[in-house]
Structure formats: structure tokens, C-alpha cells
Image: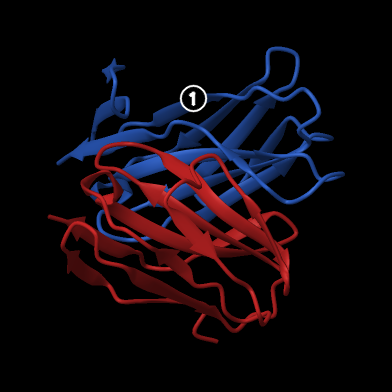
Chain colours: A red, B blue
Amino acid sequence: NAGVTQTPKFRILKIGQSMTLQCAQDMNHNYMYWYRQDPGMGLKLIYYSVGAGITDKGEVPNGYNVSRSTTEDFPLRLELAAPSQTSVYFCASSHRGELFFGEGSRLTVL
Amino acid sequence: GESVGLHLPTLSVQEGDNSIINCAYSNSASDYFIWYKQESGKGPQFIIDIRSNMDKRQGQRVTVLLNKTVKHLSLQIAATQPGDSAVYFCAENESGGSYIPTFGRGTSLIVHP
């Protein structure tokens, strides 16, 4: 099993550009999550999904969108990138409450 | 020693010492708790978990203690090694609801050789 795979690992965006962070898991987990982690800080929940076709907002959803068309994939979309979205983004899936994280996607908005 | 500020609290220890990392949780209904370790540049990884019907659980060199009365969780690392240097997060879950964990603030552990 590859676990949770995130792409890209690094990306630099200009203000106002859009992009999608990809996340895929091969563990057949129903729950998936997107977190952001600012330097020296904790994890903040952006969006989560309890299964294919179902998504919900977390603590900091503004400026982001998600979709969950399959169990495996949970992409995170930034429509109009802003410097405040410079962060490391982690995708995770869970089995009975234990989260399995990807390696992260480091995004810089200039 | 431990310092608390706007960023992550930091605990500095010498190699070979025992480390204790603390976490206060907020939801009285939480009944499942997990400690995660996040090494620099990586995603958090599961270390050990405990359910609310227990007050202590031991793993290899790690022990988690749960005090439900004061809503407090601690992670003890025996004979701390440089490879233990990382950020440690606690997470609380209410297993009767959705599996949407609430993460603690995190503590940065620095082990000096």
C-alpha cells in the first residue's frame, strides 16, 4: 500500500492564480481530511469528507473548495491564491479515528 | 525546560533523559485519544493511542497517561534519543460521533546529544 499520496510536493503560485492539490489513498478509508499547517504552528482543518459524494467545512474553509467523487481521491482547490494561503497542506485519511497523513504539499503564494 | 508562546511550546531535554509531554483536551465526551509524532518536513505519524476505559497504556519506550477528571493527557518517552526530536500532537475523538479529531496545539521536543 502506498498509503496517502499528495502531489505536488512543492509549488509556487502568483497571487490570483488557481491550482488543485491532489490527494489519493489506497486504504479504502471513508474519511478524508485536508489540513493546513503554518510555520511553527499546529494543524487546522480546512475540509473533510465522510465518504464519496459528501464533504463538509472545517475550521478554515474560506478560499478553498473540495470534491469527493471517489473513495480514493480528495482534491483541494484554491481558486484565487492569496499570500495568506502560503502554508504546508496535509491530506489524511482515517480508519476508526486513527489518521494516516500524506507527506505534505508546500505552497508559496507570491 | 518548557516554554510557551504564540508558537509551539518547546521542551528541551538531554539524550538519555525521560521526556514528558502534556496535553489538555476540551471535550468531556471524548473517549479515544491518539499521540502523533511529526518529524521535520514530514506528515504526522501515529505513535500510541488510548481509550477512555484505560488510564495508562505502554508501548515501546512510550507511555500514555490519561486523567479524565482533569481532562489531561501525557506522553512519556523513556531514554529520549536524538531521533525523538519532533513535534508531538495529541488528538481527541468522540467515537460515538464522526471521526473528526480535535488536535492539540503541539509540542516541539528537542533532544540534545
User: Vertical placement of B9 versus A54: above or below?
Assistant: above
Amino acid at dot 1: Asn
On the image, the x and y values in percent for residue B4 come to: 31, 17
On the image, the x and y values in percent for residue B78 come to: 43, 38
On the image, the x and y values in percent for residue A64 come to: 45, 56
Q: Quadrant of residue A39?
A: top left
User: What secondary structure is marked by label 1?
Assistant: strand
Whether residue B59 is visible? no
Q: Is residue A46 left or right of residue A27?
A: left
Q: Quadrant of residue A48?
A: bottom right
Residue at 24%, 59% (x, y): give it.
Answer: A16
Mark 1 — residue?
B22
View extreme (right): residue: B96
Q: Please count the marks in the image.
A: 1
Q: Is residue A48 left or right of residue B29?
A: left
Q: Is residue B110 left or right of residue B24?
A: left
Residue at 22%, 70% (x, y): give it.
Answer: A10
What quarter of the picture does the C terminus of chain B occupy?
top left
Mark 1: give few (<14), some (14-19) or many (20+) Cα within 10 Å.
some
Out of B108 and A11, give the one closest to the viewer.
A11
User: Vertical placement of A79 versus A44: above or below?
Assistant: below
Q: Quadrant of residue B14?
A: top left
Residue at 76%, 33% (x, y): give it.
Answer: B30
